[in-house]
Amino acid sequence: MFAVLPRHPNGPADQLSDIPVECVEASAVSSRTVEDPRLDGRPVKRIAFGADQISQRVRELGKQITESYPEGELLVLGLLKGSFIFLSGLVRETRRPLPVDFIVASS
């Protein structure tokens, strides 16, 4: 989970709701079994989004954020721990200065 927030109270925060989110049809999901050493021998039964799809979408989101917020200060706020890898890619693809911060939530 992540948010890109305007740092000024009268910024266009509602523009992010217009950014489209793509879904993948069930037929596009891989059904091959993948072994990953990070999972202690447990197999990955399906891959919902491939690395190329994720990279392409992160590039698109970075471009959309850059175009939607050409000026003013923005703060990228991520929810630890799951968002930090995604956010690092998103910040790299956003062509403007972006400070990054994280919040921690517990259940």
Image (spheres, helix red, strand yellow):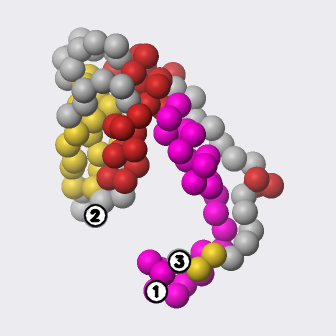
Residue in view at x 22 percent, y 47 percent: 102
Please, what secondary structure does the residue beneath circle 2 have?
Answer: loop
In the image, is residue 23 above or below residue 62?
A: below
Q: Where residue 59 sits: x, y (%)?
A: 50, 35
The residue sitting at 20% across, 34% down in the picture is 99
Residue 55 in sight here: yes
In magenta, the rendered stretch is 37-60
**Amino acid found under the numbered disc labelled 2:** Ser
Pointer 3 local density, CA inside 10 Å: few below 14, some 14–19, many at least 20: few
Which residue position holds label 1?
A: 40
Marks 1 and 2, the one that precedes in the sequence: 1
Mark 1 or 2: the one toward you = 1
Which is more toward the observer, 56 or 24?
56
Q: Decide: is 3 above or below 28.
A: above
Dot 1, crowdedness within 10 Å: few (<14), some or many (≥20)?
Answer: few
Q: Residue at x 25, y 30 (%)?
A: 98
Helix, strand or loop status at disc 3: loop
Of residues 77 and 14, the one drawn nearer to the viewer in this rendering: 77
Taking the image as shown, residue 90 lies to the left or right of residue 55, namely left
- Residue that label 3 marks: 36
- Foreground mark, 2 or 3? 3
Measuring from the top left, give residue 66's x and y in whole percent.
39, 21
Q: Is residue 91 left or right of residue 42?
A: left
Residue 50: x and y, percent?
62, 55
Q: Marks 3/1: CA distance?
A: 8 Å
Callout 1: helix, strand or loop? loop
Residue 12 x, y percent position in the rendering: 34, 14
Q: Return the mark for residue 107.
A: 2
Left or right, 49 with reference to 32: left
The three-letter code of the residue at mark 1 reads: Asp
Who comes first in sequence, dot 2 or dot 3? 3
* Residue at the image point whose x is 27% and y is 35% from the top: 76
